[in-house]
Image (cartoon, helix red, strand yellow):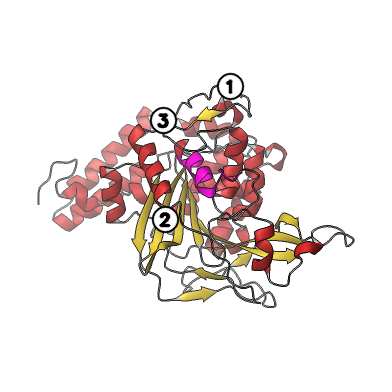
Amino acid sequence: MGTPVRPQLPSSSKKTKASYAMISNFSNVSPTFPLQTSNSFQVLSPDFPPLQPSKSFIQASKSNPKNILIQGHSSPSTISTLPSPSQSPSQSPSPSSSYSQYVKKPKTLEIAFIEPEFNFEEIPKILPYIFPPGVNFNSNDPLKTRQFYEFILADTDSVEITHNTDKNNPQRIAFSKCQILRVMTIADWNQKPFTCKAFSQPFHPMSYNYLDYMDAWYNMFYLQSYQHSWFIQFSRNCNTKFPAWFQKWWTFFGLLDSIFPPDIQEKFNFYKSKTSSQNITQPRLLTFCSRLRIPWILTWNIIKKQEQPLYFPLSLSREFNIKWWDKFNHDFVCQQKVLQLISSRPGSSNSKDSSRSSQGPTQEEFLTLKRKCQASLAAATDLEQYRQGLIQTLKEFGDHQENEETLSDDSYVDPEFILYGGPMGQSR
């Protein structure tokens, strides 16, 4: 196989070392498989972590940077249950609805045939014949555990993971948050797919290849069925041109526009109407959600299904369910952001203006805007008017920004920070 090659990673050694430690600490968390009933898939909602990191998360990140964090978290007092298969899918929720319902994805992922030797009625009795001990996926190498695949994505700075544990049972992960930082292509790998690279920290197995990396995007999420949910969101700096295998991943793990609230659905329909299908190289929904950082909540379940023609036995298949995150700020998907996204699309009806829009305002436009903002601030006669002027100034300049930090949740600048001790040098 040859000597493993050390990967070229942008992350610091402290970051990956901490990731390794976090994964090691949770290596003894075992999956659970409650008995399946007509409505046994219970998932945790609506109490998911806010988009803005908590203070404990920020403090921990500053003191000990890492891609994987495990936080203590109490179990929510409210448990919502997926509607049974006989129920019709819920309509797209409005921003004022209490919380959204889960929607079943149309495609399932076949796992294995149910052979006569283990054709039991209860699915948990079948699983030991399909999965190796301690994992929820097929594997011909017992050393390649879910933690192995999670560390691949952490070590390559592809994801940032936060596992939230149950306060009453620290050995149980109540729910997890995954921020997608990047998706490596073959060009990023810079080697042939089967060439092995070494982890930046001691791990067993000690190396992985690009095929393992692709598998990691599936196997990392198979933490628990029934009692666990994933909160998923793209990072603002994530690449937006995805390899074909990741587009296939999206069909199972990504969201559906049917869960969009009406105002978001309207903007997505507008985006689709203004982009040319002739030049589409990846699903437009994937581009829309990755560029605008639209989050979603994912759960999975294992079911029996006739995946193949009738002369084949039933299969065990993985079923995916998604829901809208009701705490998402709809202002992050504003009309201007959608227009910017349209203009940046090759082959779009606005493509002739894309090169100019990507360069931002001209010097003349900047000076005009600057004079307008200065006049607005100078006209203020009290603190409240000055504060409102600052808000308008930030909005005026923000409207000319092309990058995603303008409306991102974790880069918002509070005007009071500027008033009191911020960049303008004011003091309270």
Q: Quadrant of the N terminus?
A: top right
Q: Which residue is mark 3?
A: 10
Does the rendering let one see residue 283? no
* C-alpha span from label 2 to label 3: 23 Å
Which residue occupies 43% across, 49% down?
A: 161
Q: Residue at x 60, y 48 (%)?
A: 218
**Residue linked to disc 2:** 163
Whole-percent x, y for residue 189 in the image: 56, 28
Can you name the residue that lies furthest to the left here? 428
Q: Residue at x 58, y 36 (%)?
A: 241
User: What kind of element bears circle 1?
Assistant: loop
Examine the rendered structure and indicate whether residue 141 appears above or below residue 199: below
Q: Earlier in the sequence, mark 1 or mark 2?
A: 1
Q: CA distance from mark 1 to mark 2?
A: 35 Å
Q: Nearer the viewer, mark 1 or mark 2?
A: 1
Q: Nearer the viewer, residue 6 or 298?
A: 6
Identify residue type, mark 1: Gly
The residue pinned by badge 1 equals 2
Tell me if mark 1 has few (under 14), some (14-19) or many (20+) residues whose alpha carbon lies within 10 angstroms of its own: few
> Viewer-nearest of labels 1 and 3?
1
- Residue 43 position, x and y percent, is 52, 69
Q: Is residue 150 magenta?
A: yes
- Per the rendering, the mark at residue 412 is none
How much space separates mark 1 and mark 3, taking CA atoms? 24 Å
* Amino acid type, callout 2: His
Q: Nearer the viewer, mark 2 or mark 3?
A: 2
Is residue 410 left or right of 377 when viewed as pictured?
Answer: right
- Depth check: 415 or 246 in front? 246
Which portion, as a residue range, is magenta? Answer: 142-154
Q: Please, what is the dominant secondary structure of the magenta stretch? A: helix
